[in-house]
Image: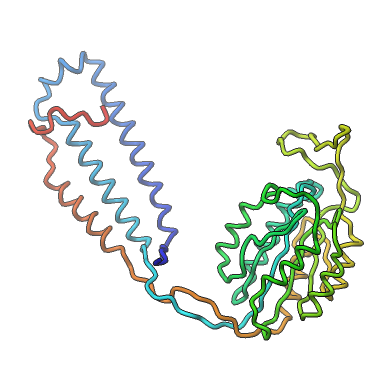
Amino acid sequence: MDNFRFANPNMLWLLLAVVVLTGIFVMSSHLSRHALARFGDVALLRPLMHGVSSQKRNIKFILQMVAMICLIVAAARPQFGSKLETVKKDGIEVMVCLDISNSMLAEDIAPSRLDKSKRMLSRMLDQMKNDQVGLVVFAGDAVVQLPITNDYVSAKMFLESIAPGNISVQGTAIGAAINLAVRSFTPREESSKAIVLITDAENHEDDAAGAATAAYEKGIPTHVIGVGSVQGTVIPDGSGRRNSPRKDSNGNPITTRLDESIARQVAEAGHGVYAHADNSNSAINSVIESLHQMKTTELESHVYAEYDDQFFWFVLVAMLCLLIDLFVVDRATPMFSKIKLFE
């Protein structure tokens, strides 16, 4: 399937002008009818306004707005990719393991552990150029949310949709996430690979350190970012109400805290760095620095190398609308006498 894109997508913001102009036109028409009504019944006054056609005015406005929309879209340069090409660039492969258990909803780090994690990952993606990245999400189980790719735009889109509800089994299966990440890399043995684990490391259910050790034996270090406070806090119940914690079967608030000892053990076993996330970017910056120090290798990626512009068709429609507009006069004609637009 051809790949579609806009070469100048920022031009589409000009479509807001169409909305504003339409609003002004509709309001102006309403005020005109209201002003006319003050002189008497509109139906009785129409015979006195021979040659005046509000329908013609409406038709001309519609033609002008369609032309304006088409010209704006044309300026944004709609394109279809016509040639899929393999591009080789030097980079590394990174699999991110993101904890999405309910405890990641805790708000001991603003705005929440999960939202802070998403922002850190978005910043990491902004720092990548030729690297490839994949995403594994986990709670009581682990699943691949995004196969390894160099499509950072799609990666950010996937980040927006991540929530604890993506995995029904609750828990913190760090080992399963690391093992799945290892299996999700490309089979290229020569490429440099790394795992970035973001978690509160609470209630781990398997041998997380052992999984990190096994990954390092394959040449894959595991970097860990611990999210949350060691003092702990309650987990919100998701209702959006202030000070409304999730409760256990006995009605007691469920608390959560960052288990730094586990997080450090995993980083040490995986020969990676450990960083504690706070309200700054220091944690993700330290991980990014470690990734940048890794040896890059030649990676292949498939991209659409040639794009064909399609703006001509929109310009053609715009010119046709403007041409018709030239022949639509403001005077009333029998042909349109029974048409009731915007009235």
Residue 233: image quadrant is: top right
Residue 110 visible in the picture:
no
Residue at 71% across, 48% down: 168
**Placement of the N terminus among the 4 image quadrants:** bottom left
Residue 185: image quadrant is: bottom right
Q: Compared with residue 20, is residue 7 higher up or lower down, i.e. above or below?
A: below
Q: Report x, y in % for residue 242.
A: 76, 34
Instruction: Identify the coloring.
Output: rainbow
**Foreground residue among 143 and 340:** 143
**Foreground residue among 83 and 322:** 83
**Placement of the C terminus among the 4 image quadrants:** top left
Residue 96 visible in the picture:
yes
**Foreground residue among 101 and 35:** 101
Q: Report x, y in % for residue 328.
A: 13, 42
Q: Compared with residue 140, is residue 53 higher up or lower down, i.e. above or below?
A: above
Q: Report x, y in % for residue 98.
A: 73, 59
In the picture provided, is 238 more to the left or to the right than 234? left
Counting the numbered discs, the total is 0
**Foreground residue among 323 and 234:** 234
In the picture provided, is 251 more to the left or to the right than 322? right
Residue at 79% across, 46% down: 106
Q: Compared with residue 261, is residue 186 higher up or lower down, i.e. above or below?
A: below
Residue 214: image quadrant is: bottom right
Q: Report x, y in % for residue 151.
A: 55, 68
